[in-house]
Amino acid sequence: MIKRNRISTHGWRNLSSISLLALSVCWATGAQAQETKPSEAAAGDGGLAEIVVTAQKRGENLQKVPIAVSAFSGEALATKGIQSVVELTSIAPGLTYTVQATQATPRIRGIGTAVAGTGNESSVATYVDGVYYASATGSILSFNNVEQVAVLKGPQGTLFGRNATGGLIQITTADPKDQFQGNARIGYGNQNTLGGDLYLTGGLGAGVAANLAVHYSNQMDGFGTNKATGLDVNKTRDIGVRTKFKFDLGDDTTVIAAFDYDHTINAGPAYRPVYGEKALFTGYSFTGGFNDADSNTQPRSSVEQYGTSLNVTHAFSGVKLVSITAYRHTLWDVQFDSDGTPANLFYVNVHEPDKQFSQELQLVSTDNGPFKWMLGGYYFHGKATVSPGTVGLPAFGFVQFVRANQSVSSYAGFAQGTYSLSDATSLTVGLRYTDESKTINSDGELDFIAPAFVLPATPYTANSHVSKLTWRVALDHKVTQDVLIYASYNRGFKSGGYNLFALNTPNSFVPEQLDAFEVGLKSELLDRKLRFNTAAFYYDFKNIQLNTYVNSAPAIYNGKSAKLYGLDADITAAPAQGLTLTAGLSLVHARFDDFPIATTVILPTGGLVLGPFISAKGKRLPQTPSMQINLGFEYKHSLPTGSLSFAGDYFHSTRWYEGPENRLSQAPYSLVNASVTWNLDDDEKYSFKVWGRNLTNARHANQLTAQTNDLDMLQPADPRTYGVSFSVKF
């Protein structure tokens, strides 16, 4: 249910007290552990397995990295039924992942981008095998041959650079193996959904190996119906292919060439009006089902993307040189009805091709001395195009056509070093200098319907340039071999840019900046049966990039500032053989400072009108619940032949608001997911799975859009889904 009222913060405060109490208990436990010997536990004896992450661009134990990270293996994701980045919300504390018009809009600890359209990249960066994905449509990815997904929280402005203000989602896919092996899965789910995955890998000759991953999913029946056309909405077909070739050129050099292709077709975004609102022009109120639509324009979206990368690693004495070269192309075609009614009032039809090229060089120390360091350089060139962008406003008698492109060239140099001040204490200092230029070229026209004539827009070209220094300073201390505490100060920034739908004159927005202060604890207790990681943070957020809508087209503007503070925690426990329990908590207090924002008023007679400007002070940041809870379990029970594996997770979110006005909101909701897997043999060669997501069929919005012309819009998240699958390993 979508509501527009506020909620009390008493629950947040109570849970904050509980979290601080838990933190104190863990500190006490860590202090008691100082007298015990370092644990020798391993996954084989019932302890928790070590997790290796590349959060600092080198392989390190998660528990030794002074950064808040939630990491999940590909096997764990498959067991939990997590099939795409959008579903990570249910297991990663502090991450919210909404989709605006099929474009990714993730947030970490309240930092994100409400509209990540062409030319406006997300504040949460997505990396796949070390390659940055700039396109918001191209970063909504399905999982197949994934080896690990890590969510890095807080600005990563030193090692990962531009547009990682809120953090990043780091996806690592499997490298080829010399020995032939593979797996295949075929499945069937509700809404007549057929899908499958295939993974093959093996050697092709001396020092050469390759792999191939294929993913296919076809939801043939929509979750809803467009009442105006009688056609299905909210259904998706996706096919993806990824392949890698690995060349071992002697003991010191490795080359990995990767290629990928993906095409997703969606009967959406199926925007429909919020329940209870009435249209100004027609008096229309939406009465369809939660996942239905009632639009004269049938929604459709097509995202086609492909890319290639070349990773070359060469080891010298004491250092390693890494070169990552990549090219990506994304083509997005979308059409939807922005008024959400059967009347021909507003519609959007956009063709957006994006291209990017990147080159990164890293020089990484590999010796075991007290000083570990990294030097690097990064170049990025991208071109985002609207060709054309059509915003139809038949109700006002005209159609707006925009043809625009925005190019960016970004150069950066970075360095980070960690020095061991003692056996227990280390200091990390990192700097990154970015020099970035953007250029926009735009023209267009207004086509008037009656009387029929064309008013050409004034073509224009504009340029902007920014140079920015970002940094990281962190101090960590090993209380014991299994308990680490750290404190850090980071600065990150997100690029500015231009609104590509603006006619006649350039409309720009400036970069946003985040200063982040964090203290954290990482611990493994009870002979590595319990892992407790937590972090408290304070953010000073400036020049915040916010969104609005002008004639149904998205536009970005800068708000002044905001302050955020909170706490998140990850808990993993292995209390018994075969049983793993997980819990996560995210608490965020995010409030704007004083600057003017627009208001909208719902008229009793129908429709929305602009109200007076008010102060943003005390308003909550968009799409930022004050609390999220993640609970999960995995249990494996042996049978005389084979085994049964049970998995489930629970996710709860408190209310979040659509925009800085805090008028339109998503009410609190909970999700329950579960699966049962029957491994038919001891080697787990054959398995049969029954799974379900959102089992309680909770109704919640994937995205809300507060408009200024007629009706507020809602894009529903997926309802209950369930199905079966059969897998084989070979």
Image (cartoon, rainbow, N blue to C red):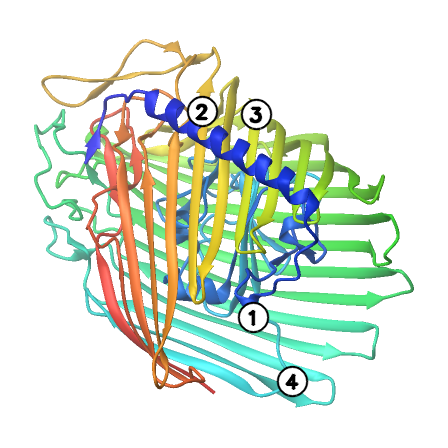
* Mark positioned earlier in the residue sequence (4 or 1): 1
* Mark positioned earlier in the residue sequence (3 or 4): 4
User: Residues under labels 4 and 2: Cα distance?
Assistant: 50 Å
* Mark positioned earlier in the residue sequence (2 or 1): 1
- Which residue is rendered at x = 30% and y = 33% of the image? 705
Q: Mark on residue 589?
A: 2
Taking 408 as reference, is 175 above or below it?
A: below
Q: Residues within 10 Å of mark 2 (few under 14, many from 20)?
A: many
- Which residue is rendered at x = 24% and y = 38% of the image? 714
* Residue highlighted by disc 1: 44
Q: Residues within 10 Å of mark 4 (few under 14, many from 20)?
A: some
- Regarding residue 455, the answer to whether it shows in the image is no
Instruction: Name the amino acid type tagged 3.
Output: Tyr
Q: Depth-wise, is mark 3 or mark 4 nearer the camera?
A: 3
Q: Quadrant of residue 540?
A: top right
Taking 363 as reference, is 23 above or below it?
A: above
* Mark positioned earlier in the residue sequence (4 or 2): 4
* Mark positioned earlier in the residue sequence (2 or 3): 3
* Residue highlighted by disc 4: 178
User: Residues under labels 4 and 1: Cα distance?
Assistant: 25 Å
User: Residues under labels 2 and 3: Cα distance?
Assistant: 10 Å
Name the spot of residue 323 as percent of width and height, x first.
Answer: 76, 60
* Mark positioned earlier in the residue sequence (3 or 1): 1
User: Residues under labels 2 and 1: Cα distance?
Assistant: 41 Å
